[in-house]
Image (cartoon, rainbow, N blue to C red):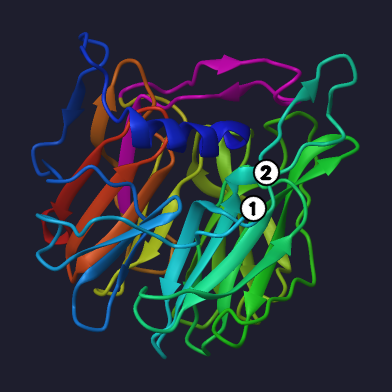
Amino acid sequence: MACRIVAVLALLAVFPFPATASAEDEVWIEPRCSLLPFNKLGPFVHLSDGSLLCLQGNTASVTADGGKTWSDPKPIYDGPKPGVPGNSVAVRTRSGAIVVVFTDQSTFKWSWDDARRAPADDVNLDVWSIRSLDDGKTWVDRQMILDGYCGALIDIIQTRTGRIAVPVQDLFRDPGRHEIRPYYSDDDGRTWHSDQFIDLGGHGHHDGAMEPTLAELDDGRLLMLVRTNWDRFWEAFSADQGRSWREIGPSRIDASSAPGHLVRLKSGRLALVWNRLYPEGKSEPARSKNVQAAAAAASWHRQELSLAFSQDDGKTWSPPVVIARRARGGLSYPYLFEPTPGKLWVCTRFSHQVGLALNEADF
């Protein structure tokens, strides 16, 4: 859930696994997948020497052997609040800058007034950015880019023109719902701009336009997939590298009320990991109605994590494959990373943490 993901990530860092596991806790893994040899959530970025940097909350660590061993975590920022890194997205630009956009967990406040069906006046989860020009050894240009409430950050990319695009979720106050403010930077994250917001309507603490993921298409447009409560992702397209989004509507990808992660792979294919609308073998979802959460009854199916590929920029997709299943759910907020061409890591980042490795060629 958007309003709790940062707090849950903090708990996972302290208590990553339950002391005992029941049958409902057990995770079935697709035989073509294997468990990652580490317990990290990402995001990950490539460094200039071929090693990988992992950002987790306000710490960074490095692996030079594909995740088998990691350096001791080092703080990113050790000064006073505000502006302490929490849930983050990151990208290494072609010039070598590591740009991190994060929510400031140090000033997190959340409460919802059921009587008014509205957020409290002091809800707060700002978005900041910071960057490193020396492969994560030091960090500079820490700054707030959104003064508001962002329940979760999902994605950031650099386009072929060099522009960095990061869609940031923000909370509307009246009526309470979420909308998206697309931010962009043309100077490797030194300065930021936002000229638009995307509002799909709705009313509730988990309603509206939420937790978008994005990728660049072959024709230079950007594709954004947006979490909704309406049985599918909505899609938006930008013809100017993420500055404005003019084509917005429902996609053909069924989805529960949970975010996905969309990535352009080295092979040129798009890969998508997400929670489908209903379990494999079913044709109808189990919807629940909670007027405080959303105006419409929604599917909250998070018992299965699915993977699909597209070779034609999202016009068509391969049949979805369930790569993990857990009766108690929690397999949500996936993160997809390609450490080497054709090898994929998939991590879930909400109430149950699973890290999977798989080969693109096997699917």
Q: Nearer the viewer, mark 2 or mark 1?
A: 1
Residue 265: which quarter of the image? bottom left
Segment colored magenta: 281-308
- Tell whether label 1 touches label 2 (CB within 8 Å): yes
Residue 305 among those drawn in magenta: yes
Instruction: Tell me the SS state at disc 2.
Output: helix
Q: What residue type is labelled 2?
A: Thr
Looking at marks 2 and 1 on the same chain, the residue that comes earlier in the sequence is marked by: 1
What is the chief secondary structure element of the magenta stretch? Answer: loop
Few, some or many C-alpha atoms within 10 Å of disc 2 (few <14, some 14-19, many ≥20)? some
Indicate which disc residue 107 carries. Answer: 2
Instruction: Tell me the SS state at disc 1.
Output: loop
Question: Which percent across, then down, holds residue 259?
Answer: 50, 43
Q: Which residue is drawn at 49% across and 37% down?
A: 255
Residue 38 among those drawn in magenta: no
Residue in front for this viewpoint, 202 or 158:
158
The answer to whether one can see residue 257 in this image is no
Question: Which percent across, then down, holds residue 55?
Answer: 38, 58
Q: Is residue 157 above or below residue 6?
A: below
Question: Which percent across, then down, holds residue 15?
Answer: 33, 27
The residue at which mark 1 appears reads as 81
Residue in front for this viewpoint, 309 or 358:
358
Q: What residue type is labelled 1?
A: Lys
Q: Which residue is drawn at 42% across and 75% down?
A: 138
Few, some or many C-alpha atoms within 10 Å of disc 1 (few <14, some 14-19, many ≥20)? few
Indicate which disc residue 216 carries. Answer: none
Question: Which percent across, then down, holds residue 251?
Answer: 57, 51
